[in-house]
Image: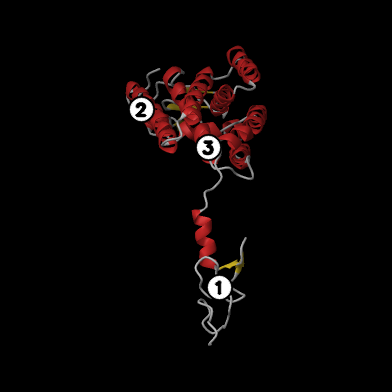
Amino acid sequence: MEAPTCYRHPGRETWIRCQRCDRPICPDCMRSAAVGFHCPECIREGARSTRQGRGPYGGRTAVDAQLVTLVLIGINVAVWLAIQATGGPRSRLVDLFALLPTGHCGVQGGFFPSVSELACHGGGAHWVTGVSDGAWWQLLTSVFTHVTIVHIGFNMVALYFIGPPLEAVLGRARFLALYLVSGLTGSAAVMLFSDSHQQTLGASGAIFGLLGGLLVVAIKRRTAVRTVLFWLGLNLVFTFTVSGISWEGHLGGLAGGFILAGALVYAPRRRRALLQWGAVALLTILALALVGARVAALGGPGTFAG
């Protein structure tokens, strides 16, 4: 009887066959399996068909449950370093990235709210673009922007401790969505309730959203609820007693994070992913719609309403 040849290497004789597809395979092609050997194609097909590990709320489990947290910290630090390298508080990156509801004419130490952009440039000053002028990116870039080392230090320490537990239980994608949507709802609250000529920056809104998410998970699991409430209450006290803190961004981020985390955690197993990502899309659209309404109230580019 003539010896069969490897289906991938026709010139090589072999008596070994894949245990799944029964095709002959040479020693270079055979892969050890629980029973016998498998060919490369069957190994790949098995990997595709094997269900990946899922967390309690549908997210994929990961060996490193702090990867997204560390990446977010890295982005915040990179933006902070860029600002320090280009002038610190006077860096044009601050004007580019920080959230400003409507543009104004900036001068050293202040601004002129009722000067047009054309007159601003003609007078030798610089125009600081706001969201109503079309700088919609500020709704998210402001979440990654810090100027002082104390500001970024507190926020990144909080993110380092709060992020990994949530990332582990929600999964990377859902955790990232919670962070970004919380930052966006915080920015929407700033647009609605803060002074239209006041710049706002920092990751605090997104971090408050993570605190809201942590509270939802604690309630769902019926564990550590009092601990989370204590830290949340302590941060709210600081929010309303320390000057220079944007309570609008904090409360907006907290509300957005709490609502979205509720949708992520309490979504029924049937069509869970559809409901969860639908909630992400709905909150995003709602936040943008509220910002759009505020922009319309400000009158669009070139207006100076307070």
- Quadrant housing the C terminus: top left
Mark positioned earlier in the residue sequence (3 or 1) = 1
Across and down, in percent, residue 158 comes to 65, 28
The label shown at residue 289 is 2
Q: Residue at x 61, y 74 (%)?
A: 28
User: Left or right: where does residue 240 sit relative to residue 267?
Assistant: right
How far apart are the two marked residues, 1 and 2, measured between alpha carbons?
61 Å
Across and down, in percent, residue 299 comes to 32, 24
Q: Please tell me whether mark 3 sits on a helix, a strand or a loop.
A: helix
Residue 6 seen in this snapshot? yes
Q: Is residue 57 above or below residue 34?
A: above
Residue on which disc 1 sits: 17
- Which amino acid type corresponds to the residue marked 3 in the rendered image? Leu
How far apart are the two marked residues, 3 and 1, measured between alpha carbons?
46 Å
Residue 122 seen in this snapshot? no
Residue on which disc 3 sits: 176
Q: Please tell me whether mark 2 sits on a helix, a strand or a loop.
A: helix
